[in-house]
Image: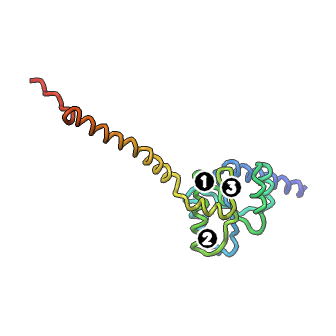
Amino acid sequence: MANAKNIEMKAAQVAEVQEKLQKANSVVAFDYRGLTVAEATELRNEMRKSGVEYLVLKNHIVKRACEAASVDGKFIELLHGPSAFAFGYEDAVTPAKILKDFVKKAKKCEIKGGIIEGEFMDAAGVNAIADLPPRDVLIARLLGSMMSPISGLAIVLDQIAKKMGGGEAQPEAAAE
């Protein structure tokens, strides 16, 4: 009876992790060895503030969830040794960025790899993604570069209109 209940609990855990894997924009796996309780708490708080879920999960549960969710087998190969996972639901880059900064500061633990927007990335790939500016900054840059030609065109058209019309259009005289 206890064994059946244990199997049910594991099945529920696998289903829960599978749902997280499918819902997340990114998942970063990392080895948390060497972290003190205070450092782990600091990391967890930092992630929570940024909308990232930090979980320490058993590798066999994550492996089963990955298989059920059809996750890239290369990610499953990372599941050995102590593993913690950062699930990013809002911005795909945030978990990688937080972990990279934390590893640099703490000089402990290491990024194993991850899945960013459905694509497997090894540790080097996750670290490279972490160097990207935040999504809103990238969008602002894109919009700025798109607006540059338009504003330049507006200036040229204004100069042509001044030459052809002898200056800016004059407002009509007010009726007396």
Quickly name the residue at label 1: 92
Q: Earlier in the sequence, mark 1 or mark 2?
A: 1
> What x and y, as percent, mark residue 122?
69, 61
Give the distance between the C-alpha atoms of the residues marked 3 and 2, in whole angstroms: 19 Å
Residue type, label 3: Ile
Asked if residue 67 lies left or right of residue 137, the reply is right
- Give the structural element (helix, strand or loop) at label 3: strand
Quickly name the residue at label 3: 115
Give the distance between the C-alpha atoms of the residues marked 1 and 2, in whole angstroms: 18 Å
Farthest residue, direction top: 175
Quickly name the residue at label 2: 103
> What x and y, as percent, mark residue 29?
69, 62
Asked if residue 134 lies left or right of residue 20, the reply is left
Asked if residue 71 lies left or right of residue 146, the reply is right
Residue 97 lies, with reference to residue 66, above or below; the image says below
Give the distance between the C-alpha atoms of the residues marked 1 and 3, in whole angstroms: 9 Å
* Residue beneath the point at 91% across and 55% down: 1
- Give the structural element (helix, strand or loop) at label 1: loop
